[in-house]
Image (tube, rainbow, N blue to C red):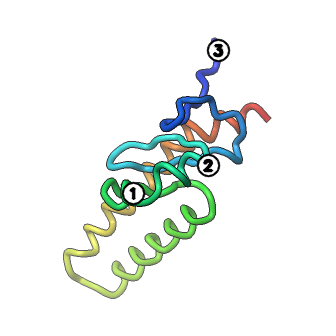
């Protein structure tokens, strides 16, 4: 059984280096990019329209931690319905991260 290569969405080339992999959520899907392709072709006006943000790396981890802390604070200090909307968003982000790990990032961890 051969491993299916990870293909960049922009340039359609194989991503061989785990440090070059950027996974980003676009609407309700997770897509892989080369770091260069994400930085030059995807980020910018497309990211505003499509809510495209990286899931791995420093910025992805920091944004996830902020969402987690916001959800925790809203659950502790508010009784309004907004806390359930933020909880749904947190669950969606968590699902994106688990999917990205299983489909893309884990392939590089198995190879080493």
Q: Which of marks 3 and 1 is in front?
A: 1
Residue pointed to by mark 2? 35
Q: Residue 2 carries which label?
A: 3
SS for dot 1: helix
Give the label, 3 or 2, closer to the camera: 2
What is the x, y in percent for residue 35? Answer: 61, 49
Q: Which residue lies furthest to the bottom in this view?
A: 77
- Residue 47 x, y percent position in the rendering: 39, 57
Q: Residues within 10 Å of mark 3 (few under 14, many from 20)?
A: few
Q: Quadrant of residue 34?
A: top right
Mark nearer the N terminus (3 vs 1) = 3
Quote the CA–CA distance across marks 3 and 2: 25 Å
Tell me, yes or no, whether the two marked residues, 1 and 2, touch with CB atoms within 8 Å: no
Q: Which residue is drawn at 32% across and 49% down?
A: 27
Q: As drawn, is 102 to the left or to the right of 45? A: right
Whether residue 92 is situated above or below residue 31 in the rendered picture = below
Q: Find residue 52 and report its horizontal and vertical position in percent.
A: 41, 55
Q: Nearer the viewer, residue 29 or 13?
A: 13
Q: In which quarter of the image is residue 86?
A: bottom left
Figure quadrant of residue 39: bottom right
Helix, strand or loop at mark 2: helix
Marks 1/2: CA–CA distance: 15 Å
Residue 43 visible in the shown view: yes
Number of marks in picture? 3
In the displayed structure image, the side of residue 107 where residue 89 appears, left or right: left
Q: Mark 1 points at which residue?
A: 47
């Amino acid at each position: 059984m051969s491993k299916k290569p990870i293909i960049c969405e922009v340039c359609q080339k194989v991503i061989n280096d785990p440090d070059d992999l950027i996974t980003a959520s676009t609407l309700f899907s997770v897509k892989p990019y080369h770091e260069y392709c994400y930085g030059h072709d995807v980020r910018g006006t497309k990211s505003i329209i499509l809510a495209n943000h990286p899931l791995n790396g420093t910025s992805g981890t920091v944004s996830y931690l902020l969402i987690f802390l916001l959800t925790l604070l809203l659950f502790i200090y508010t009784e309004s319905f907004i806390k359930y909307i933020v909880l749904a968003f947190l669950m969606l982000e968590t699902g994106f991260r688990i999917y990205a790990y299983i489909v893309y990032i884990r392939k590089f961890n198995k190879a080493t």
